[in-house]
Image (tube, rainbow, N blue to C red):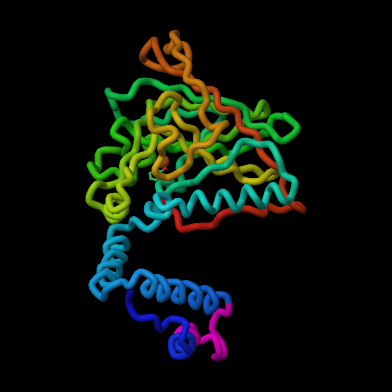
Amino acid sequence: MGVKIFNGKDVQDFLRIIANLDGAGGNERAKQVVHRIVSDLFKTIEDFDLTPDEVWLGINYLNKLGSEGEAALLAAGIGLEHYIDMRLDAEDAELGITGGTPRTIEGPLYVAGAPEQKSKARLDKNPDPDAGPLRIHGRVTGPDGAPVADALVEVWHSDSKGFYSHFDPTGRQSEFNLRGAIRTGADGRYEVLTRMPASYGCPPSGATQTLLNQLNRHGNRPAHVHFFVTTDSFRKLTTQFNIEGDPLIWDDFAFATREGLIPHVVERTGGQAVGFEEDGYRDIEFNIELTPKVAGKDNQIVERARAAA
Ligand code: MBD
Ligand code: FE
């Protein structure tokens, strides 16, 4: 099936020229990575005997992906973002770092710059009658269980349609709706009053869902709440919890669900006493245990392009 030229001298020499492996200058690491990726691509074309039409379909797919700004969404969907977490977990295991709240993926929908509030924040700025009141609270501690003061707890989640402010296709949410940044006091506590998120679905006609359709996979996530927890003393934690009972919890297209990140949802009354308009509300306690720096440094800090407002 198909011609076999990949292992021949012509193609192997060509691959070295493409990446300028034998030339001076450039970025050595980039040269090696480009050489490997282009080689793997050429080999894939040969092994599957891809037709020119199929190759151009793939090129056009990349244009669609980029023009829609969905590359980071696809990274979640093909498990690339979770794979990075698996590598960070393995690195921790190798260093003997155990315990702490599990990390899980950031996802593509964080927005920097939410105004900081002390100990407690109300996140819902727009009415959302389909989303009931939700209180989220907990304590930030170090590995020794002692409370961490001055931790910045950033929280973000979707509305009842699964849409996030700043990225909402309906344009209905105001800036930083359902996003907050809470600074802990001496007791290490944070508290958030907000409204229940719902499950997220990839844009149905977008590049990510287009690829998932080819795999007969859905592009949905269980309802979840994202966290960044940043301090001076410990490693930054990137995590999320899922809303208990969501049928997609173990069927997340982005592979973010982990044991330890499904806190109980408790039905409570007395909402006015905690600051809601309603009497009945749901309550989630989510405590956060941070992990130590390595030789005084956060060895796993992730820099990536992020939206800001
Ligand atoms: C999300 O809300 C999300 O968290 C991820 C990882 C991907 C798409 C939407
Ligand atoms: Fe999300």
Q: Residue at x 62, y 27 (%)?
A: 139
Is residue 96 part of the magenta span, yes or no?
no
The quarter of the picture showing ligand 2: top left
Q: Residue at x 39, y 33 (%)?
A: 248
- Nearest to the observer: residue 239 or residue 193: 239
Give percent across and percent down for residue 47.
Answer: 39, 71
**Residue 189 higher or lower than 50, as above or below:** above
What's drawn in magenta, residue-wise? 15-28
Q: Residue furthest front?
A: 1
**Residue 9 higher or lower than 105, as above or below:** below
- Nearest to the observer: residue 13 or residue 149: 13
- Magenta region's main secondary structure? loop
- Nearest to the observer: residue 53 or residue 284: 53
- Nearest to the observer: residue 217 or residue 180: 217
Write down the quadrant of residue 100 in the picture. top right
Q: Residue at x 27, y 73 (%)?
A: 51
